[in-house]
Each structure stands twice: as C-alpha cells, then as structure tokens.
Image: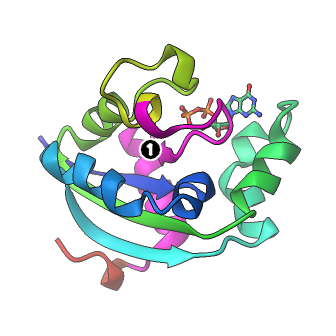
Amino acid sequence: MTERTFSIIKPDATRRNLTGKIIDRLETSGLRIVAQKRMWLSQKQAEGFYAVHKERPFFHDLVKFMTSGPVVVQVLEGANAVAKYREIMGATDPKKANPGTIRKDFAESIEANSVHGSDSAENAAIEIRYFFADTEVVG
Ligand code: GDP
C-alpha cells in the first residue's frame, strides 16, 4: 500500500553534514522524497511537535536539542512508508539499533539520534500538516 510518512533529519546530523548520506539511505530503500525543506525550528514549533512528550523528563532537553541547529523536514512516500522508514531508522537508542540502520551508523546518543520518523499513518498525516501545505507536497 502506497502511503506517506514524515521525517526530520535532526540537528546532530545537519551539523555533521550528513544530510546527503541519510537521503541516500532512504532513497536506496525505495522511499521517494515528495516534499523537503531545511529550517530552524522555533521553541514553539519544537514544543508543539513533541507535545505528546511534554510530561517526559527529557522534554526540555529534547526541545533544546531540536532547536540547536537546522533540521531538514521531509515527506516520504512509498509502499508501507511508515514501517519501512522505522525499519531503516533503527531503534530510538542507537546502542539497541540493528546493524546497517541510520541510527546505528550515525546517531550520537538516544537524544541526538539523527532522524525522526512517524510511528503511524495517523500521526504521519498530523505531522505532515504541521510542517507542509498541501501545495508543497508533490508526489
Ligand atoms: P522515536 O519515535 O524513536 O523518535 O522515539 P520517541 O518518540 O520515544 O522519542 C522522541 C525523541 O525523544 C527521540 O527520537 C529522542 O530524540 C528523544 N528521546 C527519547 N528517549 C529519550 C531519553 O530517554 N532521553 C533523552 N534525552 N531523549 C530521548
């Protein structure tokens, strides 16, 4: 089933000039980039995006990290895009991520873990709408 997911290349990855290497991984996996922009999240944007985590002890640090440098936000399209991207991203904690995954190979820590990918098609739709107008997504 063709579906869309939402991705962020996080500040630790843009800082180390890894945008292209990460894009290569996801395109090689069969996902297509149907929207993309580089931006610097405001505190408000980061807090809103991670609102589900606002009671977690790491929320403040996470917002600080996500606003510490530019990110690249993307919409990815392909067969089972949500699960496919989660698979090539690897586990949240890079120490637990499978070999060959983006987080295993690039992440610095459980927080600075290089990429975000939606965890469900429902959340993907919400997250895409948070960052992109319909006219900016070109399939
Ligand atoms: P994801 O879906 O794999 O990104 O993981 P979560 O939704 O559970 O967490 C969102 C983001 O919060 C992660 O990608 C990390 O950047 C960060 N994070 C998750 N767990 C921790 C933690 O225990 N400590 C810190 N500092 N950050 C965390």
Residue at 55% across, 27% down: 92
The location of residue 30, given as percent across then percent down, is: 12, 47
The magenta stretch spans which residues?
105-133
The location of residue 46, given as percent across then percent down, is: 72, 60
Q: Looking at the image, which is closer to me, 27 or 122?
A: 27
Identify residue for label 1.
117
Report the side of 82 relative to 118 (left or right). left
Q: Is residue 32 above or below residue 122?
A: below
Report the side of 36 relative to 114 (left or right). left
Residue at 54% across, 58% down: 16
Circle 1 Cα neighbour tier, 10 Å, few/some/many (<14 / 14–19 / ≥20)? many
Indicate the quadrant where residue 112 lies: top right
The location of residue 75, given as percent across then percent down, is: 34, 62
Look at the numbered disc 1 and say if its residue's Cβ is closer than 8 Å to ligand 1.
yes
Residue at 42% across, 80% down: 133
Quadrant where the N terminus lies? Answer: top left
Q: Looking at the image, which is closer to me, 101 or 116?
A: 101
